[in-house]
Image: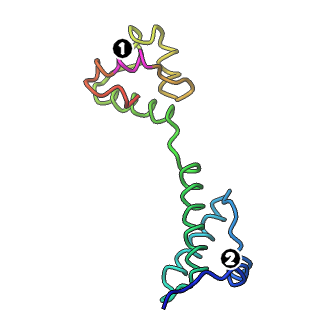
C-alpha cells in the first residue's frame, strides 16, 4: 500500500506542531523534543514525515548559526595556546605583529589575523596557516 500525501491532514499536523524559524535555544529544545517524539513513533504518516524533515532543517539552520565558531576568537585562542606551548610572551611576536598591543588584540580576538600574518605565524609555529 502506497501512502499518499493528504493536504488536509498536513494542515492538521501543521497546526499541532506549528513549525517556525528557530531563534532561541528554548525554541530549539522544543523542536528537538518534537523530532525525538516523531523519531520514536512507529508509523509516521507522510504528513508527519514532512514535518519531521522540516523541523530537522530548521534545527540544523539554527545550530549552524547559533553555534558557529567565532573565527577571530578561535584564532586568538589558537595563538595563545601555541604561545603557551613555546613559552612565548607577546613581546616575542612583535617582529610579526609590529607591536605588543597588536599581539594582545589578536590574542583577545578583538582584531582578526590577516593572511600575511597567519602565514608568518604558521612558519614560526610549524602549523598550517588556516589555524589562524
Residue 111: x %, y % from top left: 55, 23
- Give the mark toward the camera: 1 or 2: 2
The quadrant in which residue 94 appears is: top left
Q: Is residue 20 left or right of residue 126?
A: right
* Kind of element beneath mark 1: helix
Residue 55 among magenta residues: no
Residue 19: x %, y % from top left: 68, 69
Residue 68: x %, y % from top left: 52, 46
Q: CA distance from mark 1 to mark 2?
A: 58 Å
Q: Is residue 87 above or below residue 73?
A: above
The residue located at (57%, 81%) in the rendering is 46
Which residue is more in the foreground, 9 or 2?
2
The residue located at (54%, 80%) in the rendering is 38
Range shown magenta: 115-121
Q: Is residue 1 left or right of residue 21?
A: left
Q: Is residue 77 above or below residue 8?
A: above
The residue located at (41%, 15%) in the rendering is 116
Instruction: Give the mark nearest the N terminus, 1 or 2.
Output: 2
Residue 117 among magenta residues: yes
Q: Which residue is mark 2?
A: 17
Which residue is more in the foreground, 82 or 87?
82
Q: Is residue 121 left or right of residue 14?
A: left
Q: Which residue is mark 1?
A: 92
For disc 1, the neighbor class at 10 Å (few under 14, some 14 to 19, many from 20) is some
Q: Main secondary structure of the magenta part?
A: helix
The quadrant in which residue 89 appears is: top left
The residue located at (55%, 69%) in the rendering is 53
Which numbered disc covers residue 125? none
Which residue is more in the foreground, 23 or 53?
53
* Kind of element beneath mark 2: helix
Amino acid at each position: 500500500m502506497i501512502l499518499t500525501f493528504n493536504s488536509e491532514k498536513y494542515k492538521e499536523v501543521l497546526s499541532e506542531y506549528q513549525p517556525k524559524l528557530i531563534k532561541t535555544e528554548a525554541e530549539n529544545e522544543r523542536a528537538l523534543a518534537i523530532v525525538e517524539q516523531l523519531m520514536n513513533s512507529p508509523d509516521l504518516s507522510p504528513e508527519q514525515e514532512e514535518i519531521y524533515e522540516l523541523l530537522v532543517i530548521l534545527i540544523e539552520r539554527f545550530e549552524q548559526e547559533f553555534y558557529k565558531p567565532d573565527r577571530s576568537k578561535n584564532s586568538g585562542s589558537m595563538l595563545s595556546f601555541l604561545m603557551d606551548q613555546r613559552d612565548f610572551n607577546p613581546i616575542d611576536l612583535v617582529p610579526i605583529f609590529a607591536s605588543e598591543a597588536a599581539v594582545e588584540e589578536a590574542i583577545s580576538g578583538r582584531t582578526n589575523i590577516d593572511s600575511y600574518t597567519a602565514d608568518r605565524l604558521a612558519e614560526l609555529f610549524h602549523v598550517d596557516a588556516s589555524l589562524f
